Amino acid sequence: MPSPRDASPEFQKLLDQTALDVENTMKRLLPETDLPEAPLYEAMRYGTLGGGKRLRPFMLIQCAKLFGVDEMRARRVGAALEFLHCYSLIHDDLPAMDNSDMRRGKASTHVEFDEATAILAGDALLTFAFEIVSQEETHADPRVRIELVQMLAQAAGGHGMVGGQMLDLIGEGEEFDFGTISRMQRMKTGRLISFACEAGAVLGKASEVHRRALRNYANDLGLAFQVTDDVLDVESDASVLGKPANQDEAAGKATFVSTMGKEQAKQRAEMLVDQAIRHLKVFDNRADNLIELANYVLARRA
């Protein structure tokens, strides 16, 4: 496997353009309003717009391209996924959870507004994601839309992200072994990444062989993403991360770094990225951007 490297200028340009396209789609789907409940929508826009690398929508759009999916449809699902992801960040930052005052280089939503508004904004973003995915504009085939709704619910709920967050909270008071930490992170982080990749295949009505390849790619990449995140939490500072550093250690959370040490964690991330890339062989050279993404995840600094 090649050594971790920064994204090429061409790939970075593609990442930036995709982030801009997704941002514009999100703005269109969530416009400003003068309704009496406008503060809710202001908080929703505050917690979702103007920040973030939009890696999950990027994965979804690139996987959808493998099957000739219209990019507008892929961007809609990517925007829905990003709304759901941002809801989780808004709730994670609350005092009852991670108690973080900063997110993406600015005040967390509950600090900028208040806790009650932040909770409601998260609730609204979660349900809005399903509204977008279920609409005919997302895909003409209702069976495709139903499958996407079901997949997203499974990825986000008790057997996915929310269940993983519960394990994360339990891990503040209990010592987890490597297997439990891996399961927690596959649920908390990996399930949404897995949805991103497989949703692109669902939009394109891909074969089970291709869906399995992308699912396996996502599983390994999602775990590598979290291992790298754990390393960054102890190596970087708040000015680079855009959020407080060393939060996991301060909270006594079980992480890959606390379990296996920083250097072994880095080696594990490299191994996982190598595995992720191998799953893409079935696509020949059509998946070059997904290979670039895997190396980008390994080399990222924030």
Image (tube, rainbow, N blue to C red):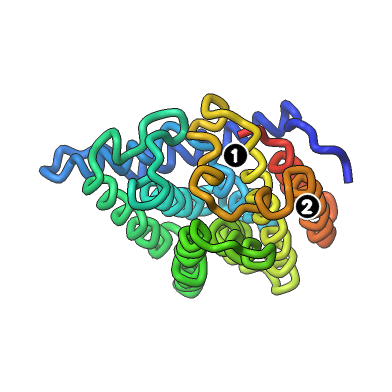
Q: Could you tell me residue 143's position as x and y percent? A: 49, 75
- In the rendered view, does 115 fall on the left or right side of 208? left
Q: In this view, does 185 lie above or below 46?
A: below
Hey, which quadrant is residue 266 in on the image? Answer: top right
Residue at image coords 63%, 50%: 226
> What residue sits 55% from the left and 48% below the top?
57
Q: What residue type is labelled 2?
A: Arg
| x 75%, y 72%: residue | 209
Q: Which residue lies furthest to the left in this view?
A: 36
- Residue 268 is labelled as 2
Res. 124 visible in picture: yes
CA neighbours of label 2 inside 10 A, class few (<14), some (14 to 19), many (20+)? some
Please name whichever residue, 27 or 113, is drawn nearer the observer in this view of the structure.
113
Residue at the far right in the pictured view: 1
Compared to residue 254, the image places residue 31 above or below, namely above
Q: What element carries label 1?
A: helix
Mark 1 closeness class: few <14, some 14–19, many ≥20 residues within 10 Å: many
Residue toward you, 185 or 275: 185
**Residue 219, picture quadrant:** bottom right
Q: Which mark is residue 20?
A: none
The foreground one among 37 and 265 is: 265
- Of mark 2 and mark 1, the one earlier in the sequence is 1
Q: Mark 1 points at which residue?
A: 233
Residue at (63, 45) in percent of width and height: 230
Q: Distance between the residues labelled 2 and 1?
A: 16 Å
**Residue 253 drawn at (x, y percent):** 54, 52
Query: Does residue 66 lie above or below 23 as drawn?
Result: below
* Residue 229 in picture, x, y percent from top left: 62, 44
Query: Secondary structure beneath disc 2?
Result: helix
Q: What's the amino acid at mark 1?
A: Asp
